[in-house]
Amino acid sequence: VEFLLGEGADVHAADEDGKTALHYTAFQGELECARLLVGAGADAAKRRKDGKTALEVAQEENKDEVAAILAGLPEIEPKLRELEARCAEGPIAAEEAAELLGWLFTTDAGDAIACLADKEEKFVRLLAKGAGLAALDAPDPAQQGRTALLRALHADRPGLAKLLLDFGANLLSKDDDG
């Protein structure tokens, strides 16, 4: 794919059924191809003749990581590796934990795409281990004093809120407004 794109291949070209390279990539779950095609301007919302988009195909085929790319969501794998490396260095201060946890609020991927919810759980588990449960309950001054649980609720992220509660987040926490 990289070679073909370099040679000027049309990322919007479709076969007789209206399927583009992105539709085929979504069906196969080819993560790197999805990155390349989207990066080259392929349209994840383009519909084939039966009306399905590449994103819908990826979701139907349970190719969740490809679906996340097609939906324009940030990738969680690099953040997981970064957190694993940080945990190996030693304890994480509450302020740093709040910053790391804040990344989860940049996307609603975990509530929308199943495999990412599993990775969000791993992220929270690692953070709780590295920083302690108190870090999950620490108020974030940059977010009106909201804890991670309150931020999840405020962002309408029920899956993340449940995850935090499962890890023991304080249900009675309050923000700056009480």
Image: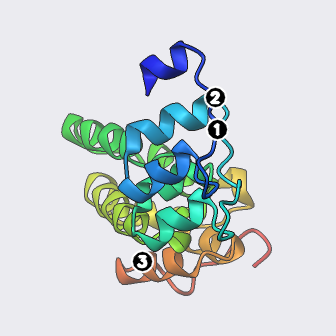
Locate the C terminus by quadrant: bottom right
Query: Which residue is denoted by mark 2 in the rendering?
Result: 10
Q: Amino acid at mark 1?
A: Ala
Q: Residues within 10 Å of mark 1 (few under 14, many from 20)?
A: few
Q: Is residue 74 above or below residue 8?
A: below
Mark before the other along the chain sequence, 3 or 1: 1
Report which quarter residue 62 is drawn in. Answer: bottom left
Q: Is residue 93 left or right of residue 91?
A: right
Q: Residue at x 45, y 64 (%)?
A: 136
Tell me the mark number nearer the camera, choosing from 2 and 3: 2
The residue furthest right is 177
Q: Report which residue position mark 1 lands on.
A: 13
Furthest toward the bottom, the residue is: 172
Q: Quadrant of the N terminus?
A: top left
- Look at the numbered discs 1 and 2 and tell me whether their residues touch, using CB distance below 8 Å: yes
Query: Where is residue 145 drawn, in percent x and y?
Result: 68, 62
Give me the residue at 64% from left, 55% from top.
18
Q: Which mark is drawn over residue 173?
A: none
| Residue 124 visible, this orientation | yes
* Mark pair 2, 3: CA separation: 43 Å
Q: Note whether 136 is above or below 26 in the view shown.
A: below
